């Protein structure tokens, strides 16, 4: 499936690929791991009917540079996102973030001190105790995972991807998500990024969450097995002014499981006075 990011932005650790679609008020879509901006392949063009939509691949992901020695921590992703916003000359865009994209967006807002007009977080890493499951095993045994034979590595990544969706992937979609992580370079890149994503980088801003005054919308799949509903409740407790919406029958990837319902929320105005 064709999804091409034709623009380039240089960071100290390599090239970030990005593109913009449509015209109107800006909205930036921020992906998580182990995904890429390909997650937005249907959402971005739909939003671009009325807005200017910016999408990009985090460094180390998708079509952006993958190489040894890159800083792929949440702190580094936050700095790179801040640089991108400056490069795009966006002083106060809407931001929509998913998975670790949530932590990146929050760090950029709270620690890199960039401004958003509003923020939507769905099935997002935000804070609390989220080092768990496969992610925790990779952190503790990175060297072991790096030695997996290619077939075992690919099976692990495919299984992990499938675990995030309740309805499953068409084969060509799964292939597109797997492509950046295949081969020796892709396998190294997969474990490189996972080994650097740490809870300490969300703990750094947790005390600042209560001071957020911008409009915030939270959306969560009730069947999310990656970040179960308790993480939505954790975040909502710290952002009591935020809207919290549930999507029944959907897992971690609302873009795949419930794109129409997700779009309905993304195109709905925030309530007046939030």
Image: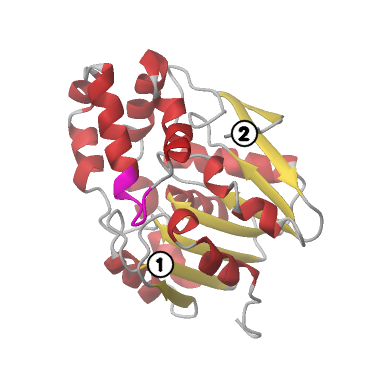
x, y percentage for residue 202? 38, 52
Query: Quadrant location of residue 161?
Result: top left
Residue that label 1 marks: 220
Marks 1 and 2 close (CB-CB < 8 Å):
no
Query: Quadrant location of residue 233?
Result: bottom left
Q: What residue sits 27% from the left and 57% below the top?
A: 225
The stretch of residues the image draws in magenta is 162-168
x, y percentage for residue 232? 36, 68
Q: Secondary structure at mark 2?
A: loop
Q: Is residue 164 magenta?
A: yes
Seen as rendered, the residue at the extreme top is 184
Residue that label 2 marks: 2
Res. 93 in view: no
Seen as rendered, the residue at the extreme bottom is 273
Q: What residue sits 48% from the left and 49% below the top?
A: 101
Query: In the rendered image, which quarter contains the C terminus?
Result: bottom right
Res. 8 in view: yes
């Amino acid at each position: 499936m064709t999804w091409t990011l034709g623009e380039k932005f240089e960071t100290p650790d390599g090239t970030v690929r990005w593109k913009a679609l449509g015209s109107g008020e800006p909205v930036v879509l921020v992906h998580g791991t182990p995904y890429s901006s390909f997650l937005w392949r249907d959402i971005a063009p739909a939003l671009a009917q009325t807005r200017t939509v910016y999408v990009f691949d985090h460094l180390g992901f998708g079509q952006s540079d993958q190489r040894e020695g890159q800083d792929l921590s949440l702190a580094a992703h936050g700095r790179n996102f801040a640089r991108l916003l400056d490069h795009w000359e966006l002083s106060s865009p809407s931001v929509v973030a998913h998975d670790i994209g949530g932590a990146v967006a929050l760090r950029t807002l709270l620690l890199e001190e960039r401004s958003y007009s509003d923020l939507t977080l769905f099935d997002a890493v935000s804070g609390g105790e989220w080092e768990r499951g496969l992610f925790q095993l990779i952190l503790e045994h990175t060297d072991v995972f790096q030695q997996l034979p290619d077939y075992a590595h690919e099976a692990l990544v495919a299984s992990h991807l499938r675990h995030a969706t309740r309805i499953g992937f068409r084969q060509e979609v799964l292939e597109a998500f797997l492509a950046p992580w295949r081969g020796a370079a892709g396998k190294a890149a997969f474990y490189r990024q996972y080994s650097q994503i740490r809870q300490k980088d969300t703990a750094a801003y947790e005390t600042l969450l209560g001071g957020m005054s911008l409009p915030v919308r939270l959306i969560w799949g009730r069947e999310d097995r990656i970040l179960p509903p308790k993480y939505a409740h954790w975040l909502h407790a710290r952002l009591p002014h935020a809207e919290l919406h549930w999507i029944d029958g959907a897992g971690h990837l609302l873009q795949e499981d419930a794109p129409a319902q997700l779009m309905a929320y993304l195109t709905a105005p925030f309530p007046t006075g939030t």
